[in-house]
Amino acid sequence: MTELMVRQPGWQATIQDAGRSGYFQQGLSQGGAVDEHAYSWANKVLGNEAGAACIEILLGNFEAEVGADTTIVVTGADIPVTLNGDVIESWCSHRVRRGDVIRFGQVRSGLWAYLGVAGGWQTPLQFGSRSVVVREQLGGLDGGPLKKGDRLPFTPMPERPLHCVPWVHRPNYNEPLTAKVIPGYQYEQFSLVARRTFETADYKVTNDINRMGFKLSGPAVAANAQKLASEGIAYGAIQIPPHGQPIVLLRDRQTIGGYPKIGCVTSLDCARLSQCSPGTRVRFEFTDVDSV
């Protein structure tokens, strides 16, 4: 086993896998890759196990040196990526050699990119996952984002077959998003007017976004009960605080909450929403499980 050395960590880069399952009762967040679509394709292209760890890179400006011959892939946000100064195609796997330098430029669309390696990054497992949740100081090398000089272990696998994600499965992060929402059991606490407003209005992604959730702004909607007994929070849950502005909760969400929830955004649309930069317009559409 050898290592990848981080030369420039960029704005924020963390180790993420499929997340921690079964630890909500201990108060631990799920964590995991915020764009499940891009993350899953990275592992698929490399022939990895579905839950192998990738590096999740926010906004680019990441640079690292490879310590041994292996195979890599970059998926997710539209960011120019170079290998020893030569541009490489994202959503395709590439063979790299010891001493090669991978560099991510500035993001052009989307927010999060994924750097995967054949076999996955072999950082320590904690509660069944390698994923970093900064708030809980869990995962990765020290529970936080990668730093200059960090070394990530991996097993050299230079002879993996090379593949590309089919074009039909490569998202265009500039396309308008209409997120599908499955109504929750508190749906009936919202008036017909509130539901209709929520489904027909445009909402804007605010600057208040992170791996925990995305706050949106637009026409206010309100439930009959402004606050309920705290309960478990599902991935994609849309909380409506008293001010009426929706919050879509993502991978690093809190484990319990008491605000009314009008429904849940489907997992694939959570992935798309996670790539929406501040100012992006988003619409919602109610659906059911059979139609997703």
Image: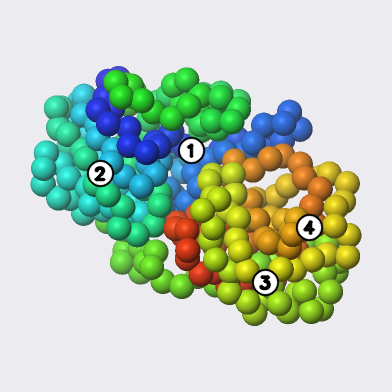
Residue count near mark 4 (Cα–Cα under 10 Å), binned few <14, some 14–19, many ≥20: some
Real-space CA distance between mark 4 and mark 1, rounded to the nearest whole angstrom: 34 Å
The type of residue carrying mark 2 is: Phe
Real-space CA distance between mark 1 and mark 2, rounded to the nearest whole angstrom: 20 Å
Q: Is residue 214 above or below residue 284?
A: above
Q: Identify residue for label 1.
A: 17
Among numbered discs 4 and 3, the one appearing first in the sequence? 3
Among numbered discs 4 and 2, the one appearing first in the sequence? 2
Mark 1 against mark 2, which lies toward the viewer?
Answer: 2
**Going 35% across and 54% down the picture, which residue do you hit?**
77
Real-space CA distance between mark 4 and mark 2, rounded to the nearest whole angstrom: 41 Å
Q: Which mark is residue 104?
A: 2
Q: Identify residue for label 4.
A: 242
Residue count near mark 1 (Cα–Cα under 10 Å), binned few <14, some 14–19, many ≥20: many
Among numbered discs 1 and 2, the one appearing first in the sequence? 1
Q: Is residue 125 left or right of residue 6?
A: right
The type of residue carrying mark 3 is: Pro
Among numbered discs 3 and 2, the one appearing first in the sequence? 2
Residue at the outermost front position = 243
At mark 3, the secondary structure is: loop
**Going 59% across and 31% down the picture, which residue do you hit?**
135
Q: Is residue 23 above or below residue 188?
A: above
The type of residue carrying mark 1 is: Asp
At mark 2, the secondary structure is: strand
Q: Position of residue 51 (x, y in %)?
A: 48, 39
In this view, the residue in front, 210 or 4, is 210
Q: Identify residue for label 3.
A: 219
